Image: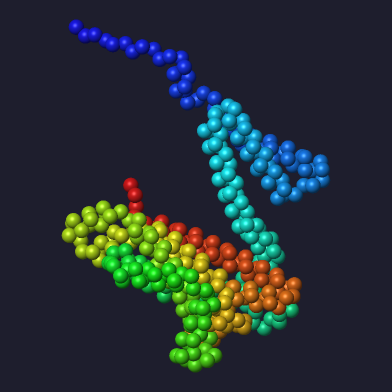
Amino acid sequence: MSTTTTQPPEPEATRSALDLRRGALPHRFPAVLLASTAAVVAGVLLAFSTFGFALWAILTAVAYTAIVVTVSARVEGGRKATDRLVTALVYGCFLLAMLPLVSLLWTVAQNGMARFDGYFLTVSMNGVLPSMDAGGVYHAIVGTLAITGMATLIAVPVGVMSAVYLVEYAEGRMKRVITFFVDVMTGIPSIVAGLFVVALWMMLFGPGHTNGAAGAISLSVLMIPVVVRSSEEMLRLVPRDLREASYALGVPKWRTITKVVLPTSAAGLTTGIMLAIARVIGETAPLVLTAGSSAVSINWNLFDGQMMSLPVFIYSQVRMGDAVNYERAWGAALTLILTVMLLFFLARLIGRLFAPKSR
């Protein structure tokens, strides 16, 4: 004979306290409140003829935060109100951090589109006087891609292999010394890297030998520590279990690194390499000293003669000071930004292509 035990009913107060949906604001309330607050603030500022975008954004953010926290405290309680306050502050800080970036991109696009066209991208400044309304940045695009490409070919193998050594092999004092010097190199000013290569070039070939190869070496000096630090962090994120599983199958360490560790961290390594490229592709000072600043024709040879790049082209055009030169500088700045964006897009595709497939 079985007996059943019946649980006593829960008190009404306990059931109401455990009801997580009690006293909750509607899901769309923050969005509706933000839109309403923005409209009301805009109407008030227009009524007093003091409308400004910055003032409108600040007053809207302050009014929205005050209203949503007050209403949440009365309806949802103190903990939820605190959560909404922190959420509003986090979103506000994010938008504040994005504002300079958006402003920069908008300014460059607005001023650069006046000159940005097919002609501007496919001709050089060869035979064009500074005051003439002609010429383009094709020679600077060629120089930027060639110099940055050679710098990448130098810096990436050295940086990635150094990171592999630090993570997989280095121990004790040697590891600390290498890490210290990598950190020191990360903070080296770009002009110092340019002066180092100028001194090296003078020792090897004598004074006056400026070319694209010298510029690439100076950029590689700036790239290597960035690649080392970013690659080191990505390699440390590879789980130790993957290495131990490979060792348990009898796979040697070098093959474990090439077949397990590096493919697993391929996406992160690609991102680190692109950050290093973005770090140097806009450098001007080392290239002025090493690659020259007066080239006006297309030069595909990194070892013969001066080679123009987009940052140096922008600098040289702004220094001339005429209206047409400023237009060329803005067009070159827009070209440089689009080039970086295209390189990041290609790097994402390459990283996704070589990353291990997950099922």
Percent of width and height locating residue 106:
66, 58
Q: Quadrant of residue 282?
A: bottom right
Work out whether residue 254 or residue 47 is closer to the camera in this orientation and state it.
47
Give the tally of numbered discs.
Answer: 0
Percent of width and height locating residue 306:
56, 84
Residue that appears at 75% across and 72% down: 323
- Name the quadrant of the N terminus: top left
How has the structure been colored for display?
A: rainbow
Residue 123 is at least partly visible in this image: no
Left or right of 306 on screen, residue 160 = left
Work out whether residue 100 or residue 120 is closer to the camera in this orientation and state it.
100
Residue that appears at 69% across and 64% down: 111
Percent of width and height locating residue 270:
42, 62
Q: From this viewpoint, which residue is outermost toward the top?
A: 1
Q: Compared to 272, does 39 lie above or below?
A: above
Residue that appears at 69% across and 37% down: 37
Residue 222 is at least partly visible in this image: yes
Residue that appears at 57% across and 39% down: 85
